[in-house]
Amino acid sequence: MELTWDTLQQSCEGCQKCGLGTTRTRLAFGTGCRDAEVLLVGEGPGQQEDLTGEPFVGRAGQLLDVMLAAVGLSRKRNVYIANIVKCRPPGNRDPLPAEQEACLPWLRGQVSLIRPKIIVCLGRIAACRLIDPDFRITRQHGQFFYVKGTLMTATFHPSALLRNPAQKADAFADFLLLREKITGICNRTELHYEQP
């Protein structure tokens, strides 16, 4: 069967590979531009995302949108946003390794359909799962890595920035580096980037 957005999301809606599917209100599959050059990946939906079915719509999502806009990016134009797990872990706890593993095929499907030029991990959990199991977000944020042929980087999760505003400057610097990297790719390919 051909992989399409509809078939992928319908299969994900019916997923019962872990217990999170039984406790969710709504699946938070993903949001944004489906042919985006940049894919942002968080860890999992929170309460607002569980209610709306869309990743990063609460206070953390609003902060993320502001930071994206400051570097010419937007989920409406040139960014897609997803999570490692698509269902909310109870009490907003970290998704367990088995839950992450069960949900990874859906993220792989999204990557296959989007074919992003750059993947940005939002927070330690996504970075440890996608870049390196020993990733240290406080030391390695803003660095770029090639992982299986895809350029990846990581920055602080927006929720962590709300808890620790002192890290906002570092996170904004990471987004400025992302803009530089996109501009560099623009000079070599047809990557779409809008000046803020």
Image (cartoon, helix red, strand yellow):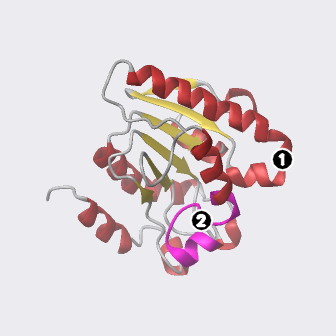
Residue at screen point 42% across, 45% down: 78
For this orientation, the residue located farthest to the left is 1
Estimate how packed mark 2 is, as few (under 14), some (14 to 19) or many (20 or more) residues with alpha carbons within 10 Å: many
Asked which secondary structure carries label 1, the reply is helix
Q: Which residue is found at the position 60% from the left and 36% from the top?
A: 154
Could you tell whether 48 is left or right of 100 in the image?
A: right
- Tell me which residue sits at (61%, 68%) in the image: 89
Residue 133 makes an appearance in the image: no
Tell me if 53 is positioned left or right of 125 in this view.
left
Q: Of label 2 and label 1, which has the lower sequence position? A: 2
For the residues marked 2 and 1, what is the alpha-carbon distance in whole angstroms?
A: 19 Å
Residue indicated by mark 2:
57
What's the amino acid at mark 2? Val
Q: Magenta segment range?
A: 48-61
Q: Residue 118's mark?
A: none
Q: Secondary structure at mark 2?
A: loop
Query: In the rendered view, would you say 113 is above or below 127?
Result: below
- x and y, in percent, of residue 101 in the image: 47, 53
- Pinpoint residue 162: horizontal percent, then vertical percent: 78, 54
Residue in front for this viewpoint, 37 or 106: 37
In the rendered view of the protein, which quadrant contains the C terminus?
Answer: top right
Reply yes or no: does residue 102 show up in magenta. no
In this picture, is 177 found above or below 169? Answer: above
Name the foreground residue: 125 vs 60.
Answer: 60
Which residue appears at 51% of the width and 43% of the height?
Answer: 73
- Name the residue type under label 1: Pro
Q: Height in image: 45 above or below 65? A: below
Residue 138 placed where, x, y %? 75, 33
> Mark on residue 165?
1
Q: Residues within 10 Å of mark 1 (few under 14, many from 20)?
A: few
